[in-house]
């Protein structure tokens, strides 16, 4: 019944809105970060003291342009990486990739991300991937658009940062993200602030693990289609090659921090 409900909704709204194949969406991206800054260095490494970790909120705005079976996602403004400190004078700089640019060509099934890491620019090429989504039958209205809810999980990794003898160490741990997306068949373009190419309609809101959200705050049919072009600045690498270079750079930074 849920599949029938979805198809019926897609056909009805598609007849009305099939003309809108291009546009611009502004999203507010919010990430909650838990960081404990009251640390003491003991003989066995880092000790935690005082109250639970403080919650820090990082908010930026992104825009997604779509048209001609392509899309471009980029930051709307210059973003400064959050900086945290503790009473011992230890400073933490958390970079979130706010200034990355993502371009997709849906006809070719090709994706290119322009990323900056450790002062280097990369062009990461990949394919448009499909997701394993489940429709829940839940609906809501966002910015006047009727939306349907879809859920999925995504295996991945999370970073754990520790301090020992004045040296900051980074470790990746396995993690699984629980994702809730709200998309509208009223704009039958498979795009959004993330998970592009995976749902049959524009994604207007995403919630990831309850601490990361994308929420559309503006939808317009006006768009500079000429701005939707493949980024060209950076070293061309595959997604696998970029991961290897990133890990290698992080390991080198940790060795330098230890004086090795």
Image (cartoon, rainbow, N blue to C red):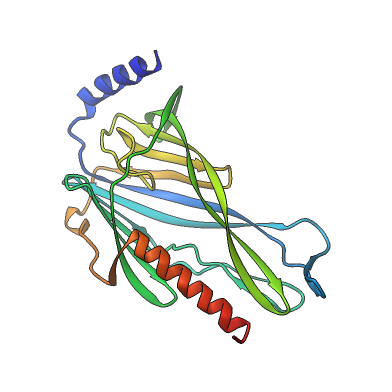
Question: In the drawing, does residue 118 fall left or right of residue 21?
Answer: right
Q: How many marks?
A: 0
Question: In the drawing, does residue 133 fall left or right of residue 89?
Answer: left
Question: Which of the pair 119/145 is nearer the observer?
Answer: 119
Above or below for 92 versus 221 = below
Above or below for 132 versus 224 = above
For this orientation, the residue located farthest to the bottom is 259
Question: In the drawing, does residue 161 fall left or right of residue 217?
Answer: right
Question: In the drawing, does residue 120 fall left or right of residue 65?
Answer: right
Residue at (41% x, 32% y) in the render: 133
* Residue 99 appears anywhere in the view: no
* Residue 257 appears anywhere in the view: yes
The quarter in which the N terminus is drawn is top left
Quadrant assignment, res 7: top left
Residue at (73% x, 58% y) in the render: 53
Question: Which of the pair 164/196 is nearer the observer?
Answer: 164
Task: Please state the horizontal and vertical placement of residue 147, each as a whole percent of the image.
Answer: 39, 29
Task: Please state the horizontal and vertical placement of residue 154, each as a whole percent of the image.
Answer: 47, 43
The quarter in which the C terminus is drawn is bottom right
Above or below for 238 versus 3 = below
Residue at (21% x, 56% y) in the render: 228
Task: Please state the horizontal and vertical placement of residue 236, each as a whole percent of the image.
Answer: 27, 68
Residue at (31% x, 34% y) in the render: 201
């Amino acid at each position: 019944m849920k599949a029938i409900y979805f198809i019926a909704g897609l056909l009805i709204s598609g007849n009305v809105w099939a003309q809108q194949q291009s546009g611009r969406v502004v999203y507010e991206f919010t990430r909650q970060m838990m960081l404990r800054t009251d640390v003491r260095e003991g003989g066995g490494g880092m000790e935690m003291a005082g109250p639970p970790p403080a919650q820090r909120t990082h908010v930026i705005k992104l825009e997604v342009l779509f048209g001609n079976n392509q899309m471009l996602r980029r930051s709307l403004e210059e973003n400064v990486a959050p900086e945290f400190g503790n009473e011992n004078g230890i400073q933490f700089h958390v970079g979130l990739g706010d200034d990355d640019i993502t371009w997709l060509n849906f006809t070719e099934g090709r994706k290119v991300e322009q990323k900056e890491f450790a002062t280097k620019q990369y062009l990461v090429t990949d394919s448009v991937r499909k997701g394993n989504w489940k429709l829940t039958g839940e609906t809501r209205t966002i910015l006047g658009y009727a939306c349907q809810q879809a859920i999925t999980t995504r295996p991945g990794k999370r970073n754990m940062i520790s301090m020992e003898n004045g040296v900051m160490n980074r470790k990746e741990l396995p993690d699984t993200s629980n994702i809730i997306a709200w998309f509208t068949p009223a704009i039958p373009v498979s795009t959004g602030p993330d998970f592009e190419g995976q749902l049959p309609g524009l994604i207007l809101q995403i919630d990831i693990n309850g601490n990361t959200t994308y929420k559309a705050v503006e939808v317009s049919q006006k768009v500079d289609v000429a701005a939707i072009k493949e980024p060209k600045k950076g070293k061309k690498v595959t997604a696998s090659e970029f991961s290897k270079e990133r890990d290698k750079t992080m390991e080198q930074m940790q060795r330098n921090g230890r004086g090795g």
